[in-house]
Image (cartoon, grey):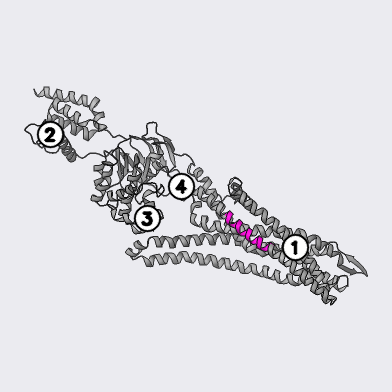
Amino acid sequence: MQDNRKDEVRSAEGRREVGHDEALGSFGDIESVVEALAREVGIEDARDIIRDQLAHRPAQAQPVAVARTRAPRVVEPSHTPRAPGVWTELKHLFGTLKRAPERTGILMLAAGIVVVLIGNMIGQVRLNNWNGDFYDAIEAKDFGAFGEQLLVFLAIIAVLLGLVVSQTWLQEMLKVRLRGWLTKHLLNGWLAPGRAYRLGMASELGVNPDQRIQEDTRQLTEMTTELGVGLLQATMLLVSFIGVLWALSSNIAFTIGGEKVVIPGYMVWCAIGYAGLGSWLTWKVGAPLIQLNAHRYQREAEFRFALVRVSESAESVALYGGEPDERRALDKTAGTVIEAMRRLSGALSRLTWITSGYGWVAIVFPLIVASPGYFSGDLTLGGLMMVVGAFNQVQASLRWFVDTFPRIADWRATVQRVSAFQTGLETVDELSAEGTRIALVDHPEGGLAFDHAGVHVADGKVVIEEATAEIKAGERVLIVGESGTGKSTLFRAMAGLWPWGTGRILLPPRGTMMFMPQRPYMPLGTLRAALAYPAAPDAFQDADVRTALERVGIGQFAPMLDKDDRWDKILSLGQQQRLAFARLLLHKPRWVFLDEATAALDEENQRTVMSIFDRELPDTTIVSIGHRPGLEAFHTRKLMLTHTDHGAHLERPPVRPGPILGTADRLLTRVLRSRNWLGRHSSLNPRPPV
């Protein structure tokens, strides 16, 4: 009899292995399976079968080798690459302008500036001619001619004043248009899906994007406009006055051996030689300013970031009593700024010897070189003043480089920073794909699967190797593990933020997924905007928004829905996490990925928000990352990342005998009692643990 019973049990186990394993594994019609086993082999043997099934059921995911993660950085090249030239950087930076919708407005403003500069050039030539007539009238002591020339002067000045005002307005509007275009262009590149995160993780080019997009962009557009207009104006005046000065040079003769010798273009060559000497000295002394300015901007950005970081973390700093330590850190960062400014000040002082000395000498230099013509009687006083005026215009055009070199150095440093940032935006995906990259593709059945997916850091170090697993729609999977085993890295890989690796991740439709990190994002603006994020604030009915707040236990904030405030400061982390679940209720995604999304909640509030998936969103698939024991009750599968000598493994955790026996007993009792099959038994007789 006993042997017959054992044969029946083995027969039932065989049927379980081929038929019931799939049912139990998928949590399908489990009650029917339990009832069939109990009818076939008896309650006690059915309990043994279920215990064995729970204790030895194979894992649903293949083991995956995992290593500890660290912040990825691009491996520095063994040699320093040659920096691109300024024209290459400008072409790269402004090359996209020809495809921008702002192009027409910018070109019209530029054309207007050219027209105004041409008018200004004509006016300056006329003013220089007036200069000769005016001083001739003074030399002749002709009061009538003197008064007439004053009236002519007023007319010329009125025209030039109108041109200067027009030039100023057009120039400022060009700055506005250029900055608007460049800021929009950089923001479009920076806020492409996942790019801001990858740029900050993968490349030093992503350091301080706020400084590069706001301050560096402002300086670049303003200085580019000012320097560009200044260079164009200097070029036009040079073209205009170099001919005038060449003609006037014929009146300057030198007496050599009793013969008068006229040097063609004498004053032009003097102006070119003087400006050339000044430009060469300026470049030799001022060249270090380019890198010094770039270094200063970098240190200023780091100091500002450190200040913002302390301000954002003021509560934590105060609780730890960490003000002295923060002061030491800020003093150190501020010290680097002061040192950068000190070095820059020294370089500017050395350059001032050249630029100021050049300017002072320029006052008398044209008089000195033109004096032979005046003292020989070939030049009148008016003629001398015309020569000096034309010389000053030519020399001013040629010395434009000398006068503006400090700003050119500042501008050059800004071009480098903004161009490098744009290069980072354009190449971050290539940097991410160095070696191999995880392919994100659509799952043919709308599920989630890892197809030999490996997750690496940017330098090739393995984080997850050859992961092969599948999660079907409707499942609720909990991934647990010790801190540092790569749980959040896996979360980022599923979100598409972590591209480094191999293989494929097959994803459900993108519009059906919502990712919820431990610290929810609170956008600036109203509480309604925070709830609707990333949708528009008015995307949901007011009643639905208020109901969502009440559902997660923060209904007290409903009267403040339209208050504009820093909600990331007003709400505690626990309240922010509950608000994130209210956001979830509004968006109703089909797939939800949680990364410690309830870590700041107590058990009661955790049950409240997680019950959403039993009531309002029963068909939603959950993939959770967490370590709190209470989370297991809300999931039907659990995978664990465990440390080994070579990293960690992703696998189904072992089931302890005690809880398994209790689970089997409770399962049988609940199922059989619901079928009225226990008869006079109120519960199963307990057995001692195995």
Residue identifier under label 4 = 198
User: Label 1: few (<14), some or many (≥20) within 10 Å?
Assistant: some
Residue identifier under label 1 = 123
Tell me: 545 left or right of 305.
left
Q: Estimate the spatial distance between the alpha carbons at disc 4 and disc 2, rounded to whole Å.
A: 56 Å
Q: What element carries label 1?
A: helix
Q: Estimate the spatial distance between the alpha carbons at disc 1 and disc 3, rounded to whole Å.
A: 59 Å
Q: Is residue 44 magenta?
A: no
Give the percent coordinates (x, y) of residue 337: 51, 65
Residue kind at label 3, given as amino acid type: Asp
Nearest to the observer: residue 161 or residue 452: 161
Q: Estimate the spatial distance between the alpha carbons at disc 2 and disc 1, rounded to whole Å.
A: 105 Å
Judge depth for marks 4 and 2 and give the one in front: 2
Judge depth for marks 4 and 1 and give the one in front: 1
Q: Estimate the spatial distance between the alpha carbons at disc 4 and disc 1, rounded to whole Å.
A: 55 Å
Tell me: 344 left or right of 325.
right
Q: Which residues fall within the magenta stretch?
A: 163-178
Q: Which residue is drawn at 82% across and 70% down?
A: 133
Residue kind at label 1, given as amino acid type: Gly
Q: Which residue lies furthest to the right in this view?
A: 258
Residue identifier under label 3 = 562
Answer above or below: position of 492 versus 339: above
User: Label 3: few (<14), some or many (≥20) within 10 Å?
Assistant: few
